[in-house]
Amino acid sequence: MPGPDLLSSQGLRLDGRRPNELRRIRCKMGVFTQPDGSAYLEQGNTKVLAAVYGPHQAAKSKSSTEGVVVNCQYSMATFSTGERKNRPRGDRKSQEMSLHLRQALTAAIKTELYPRSQIDVYVEVLQADGGAYCVCVNAATLALIDAGIPLRAYACACSASMAWHGGQPEPLVDVGHVEEAAGGVVLTVASLPSTENIALLEMSHRLHMDYFDVVLSRAMQGCRDIEVILDKAVREHLAEGWTKEDVVTI
Amino acid sequence: MWTSKTFLYKTKRGNILKIVREHYLRDDLLCGSGACKTCPHKDDEIVLMSQAESICALFDYPHYLVLDTNVVLHQIDVLEEDALTNVIILQTVLEEVKHQNTAIFQRLLEIIGNKRRKFYSFVNEHHKDTYVERNPGEKQNDRNDRAIRRAVAWYEAHLSINRVNIESPRVVLLTDDENNRKIAQDEGIICCSVKDYVENVNGFPGLVDKLSKNVIPENCSKDALYPAHLTPTQIHAGIRNGKLYQGIFHASRDNFLEGSVVVNAFEKSILLQGHIGINRAVDGDTVAIEIFPEEEWRKPSDIVLEDKSEDPGDLLEEETVLLKSTKTNSNDEVTPTGKVVGIIKRKWRQYCGILMPSRLPGATRHLFTPAEKRIPRVRIETRQSDVLASQRILVALDSWPRNSRYPLGHFVRALGPIGDKDAENEVILLEHDVPHARFSEAVLACLPPNDWTIPKEEINKRVDLRPICICSVDPPGCTDIDDALHARRIKGTTDDGLKKYEVGVHIADVTYFVRPNTALDKEAASRSTTVYLVDRRIDMVPDLLSSNLCSLRGGEERLAFSCVWEVDENANILSTKFHKSVIKSAAAMTYEEAQIAIDDESRKDEIASSLRVLNSLAKKLKRRRLDNGALLLASPEIRFQVDSETHDPVEVQAKKLMDTNSMVEEFMLLANISVAQRLAAEYPQCALLRRHPAPPPVNFVNFLKAARQQGFELDVSTNKSFSKSLDEAVIPGRPYFNTLLRIMATRCMQQAVYFSSGTCAQEDFYHYGLACPIYTHFTSPIRRYADVIVHRLLAACVGCDVTHASLLDNKAADALCDNLNYRHRQAQYAGRASVALNTHILFRNRVEIESAVVLAVKRNALQVLIPKYGLEGPLYLPSDKFTYNDEEHVQICGKVILKTFDELTVRLSLDSSNLQHRKLIFQLVKPYVPDFSYKVEDMDVEFVEESDLPQKIEKKRKGTEAKLSKKSKKK
């Protein structure tokens, strides 16, 4: 599995990161007023908007007495990639992404609190530069928090790939588009880092068992790193929000 | 680890696509200098010395060097010398080099990897202070130059912070780009051209010779001898609209003014003639060619033309000889003809050869003649010509400007004196790209200790076959014993009442020592095979393994991979088992010893009886194989008897074949086939197999014609019919005829190749020569890497070992096969070249008269074979005496008709007039042709006293030279 050189001889990746470094993450919560919760998140050049409605009464057909139904919709903007093309909602890829999102979010949400109700999560990829799914999960988590929906833990997603450095396998965390396109394996993990639970695991190619553990642990480490960042963002947002609120009410 | 990063975009514009990439700038990149106190270096991260002593007279203070891209690209040989140290390679440079020339990039990495050289690669592109953004409208090249200058300036400033005393080093930029130099000087950067720098270096006298000649731009037309090449864009456009064609240029071996290019659109290869037609293409280059209109098409000249021996200066001589001789009226033999209009990619490597004697003493410009005849002479500059004149040297090509008759190159290193055995061997190895350096420390570190013995727990894991009487049979003097055999009667009979035997083939368990992905494994994979020269063996794995721990020596406990069958009396396989085992070989025998043991009725011991069983089973196996249509082919193989002290060959003999040879061979084939079947079943995608495609019918045309002249119609439609008709083609009284037929049949065959089962359709797995549907190599892991892989695959599927990732990777397997096939082929060629070298040494002091047979009839020569020596060569026939009949492929002179398979008597002598290409001269003795054949005098050299031998030979040589020159005039 020699593949293309994703790591330079100095151990830097193509964009200048080290193998264990995430892309720069910037986020903002409460970007819209209409939905119950919303968030904007960018990881490098991948930028995503998420909006959450609910929980509200579920449509008859969907409602479940067990818990809340999480309804996800994933879509990509026409201008999200270098090549502009019309992206119909509900095509196969979006449907699959929606299902995967739902799986990860359902694991995080305390669904049993709201039987017979529904939460709608809309995510829109504004710019795609690799790892869109991970960014969507992270953005949706922020939006859910913004909406005040009780979660078991932060749901964070992160991808990892593998490269060789000096003859040793070296996993790369938070894979960008260039690295994805290079043809190596991409392992995507959505997890609840504080509980060490894995909500979703997906792999793009075959990977030998010998390397699986290192790649997975690198991806999990990425999730934990993301959780720290998200947590900090949430706390900052709340602090900011409260002070403002205080000023207005008093 | 988390540092704040400034965010910058790097945009690249392709067609319409806009690609936006992130580019992180860091502040944790180190400068690598020992003089720096600010960067948080760990001890092993300091590459550049704090006291960098200057070796250059121009700069008498300590300094580091920064290289521009053009310096690395053109002067890599200077860099490879141990002279320049404390060099900073910027990432900008590294990337540009990688982009333009991967070979040089690899060599640069090698240098950087060498700790002693103190080359530091600095990631300036990701450093927050040295990154420069491309300005609007700025060319990429200019931007890179700017980036380099910025990095130099940064280094200078960075190091000066700590400059308490004046001792701390400065930074010098080396660049051959005048523009860049000028701007750098304006910016206050110390800079210098490589030429100026190297010429003022003290203490490394050979360094100047390695300077590459500067390239003169293609558009400069002063004194131009050759037409200009088209630019890449013109070539691209030409190919796209069908006016030009792309192909790989192959120079002719015989005629230096001729070459050919294989182009997809044409069935025949495109002929290129003359200096202008070839237009500075060198063998192996990818070129763009233009095809002439059909009326100018010619046929390849059948003549042999060598470049003149003296230096004509920068002139192109008349080419009328060539062009006149090739005008022809018969239309069917013309081939498309064209000319080279541009070079798409050079495939220059380093070439071995010798310096031509120069007429002016003390001159610095010399001509170099490569050993490979297809490569043109090279002009080099050296001041060591007196020393190098008697040496074989290695030269690299630099450029071929329009105003130079010869390409320009520079001296790389000397290999040793001409005629010296080691130097000549080195040439063979280099020319055939055989990796033959000593094993590196990293590789040797993977070896077990010298006194290694089999650990107890390993024995427990394996099947213990030590009590069984196993023996090995090999050629005499063999130290890498791969295989051992056993056979014994087992209880019971088959349903048909036949006796049952257990037969085992035990192969050295190399994979126990060569673990995947270790340095040892990688080295073995890159070598792929052990190369056997006449007097030297270039091992695939270090000696400790190949002739000791892996070698299944007699009386010692060894690890083995066993393949054990139960067979009945008629050699039908009842069951097959594979397992790892421990064996203790009872005896390591030669073929001869084994044969004696079998034949000696009085011997009733276990070894002898086991050998007898094996022998009788092998005969049955062979019979069955031949009935299936396996071909028995022959090749003239010889063994040299080597003088024990000088290691010069003293005599040759044809290899003797005995029953036991074929006995061992049969069981090896059987093992290989059994393993291949198992692997193909277990790994449909990545089993390493070997196939031998059936030869296309055109290969046989000349062969069949020749056989017909002797009165035999051979049926080549299938291998079975071919094998049968070969068996029947016997002339009583001429026992060698059938062997000869088989030798020639061998030459009609395709090469057998390794492949990965995923890359080929099942029906293409067929091995034509062995007539079996599936085949692989399992039995020689000590000397072939293919067998190592097969062992690993088999071990994984019988549960003795675990798989690893690259083993199961289809693409890796395919790449591996390509390398295996390439190395395998090169190893064969190297072996043959070594035989040729030794034959020449053998004939250095003798002349012999021997019987020969005609292998082929050419326009101006016969290809003859001396069965005794397995020697082959041309016997030139002058065209004023002999007439050549195209239809029948015969040469006629009066009553004498020479045709293929004819037996002749020839005189053999060595022509040493050309030191580089010594060749054997064949002269006709019988049948006698007046004024042409050599008259045998009563006293020939063989009977001459030792003392006057040299004079005699000297005389003889003059004689042959005279003859030669006569011949060439006739042409």
Image: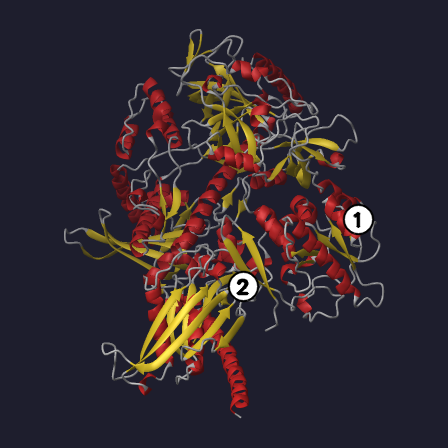
Q: Are the residues under badges 2 and 1 in a single subunit?
A: yes
Considering only vertical position in the picture, is B579 above or below A34?
Answer: above
Foreground: A60 or B312?
A: A60
| Whether label 2 touches label 1, CB < 8 Å | no
Tell me: B571 left or right of B319.
Answer: left
Quadrant that contains the C terminus of chain B: top right
Considering only vertical position in the picture, is B751 above or below B52?
Answer: above
Camera-nearest label, 2 or 1: 1
Residue A131, how many percent across, how many down? 45, 66
Residue A37, how many percent across, how many down? 42, 79
- First in sequence: mark 2 vs mark 1: 1
Residue B449 circle label? 2
Write down the residue under mark 1. B203
Give the letter of the chain under mark 2: B
Foreground: A227 or A43?
A: A43
Considering only vertical position in the picture, is B419 above or below B600?
Answer: above
Give the letter of the chain under mark 1: B
Query: Looking at the picture, which amino acid does disc 2 mark?
Result: Pro
Q: At 37% across and 42% down in the image, what residue appears?
A: B661
Q: Secondary structure at mark 1?
A: loop
Foreground: B267 or B86?
A: B267
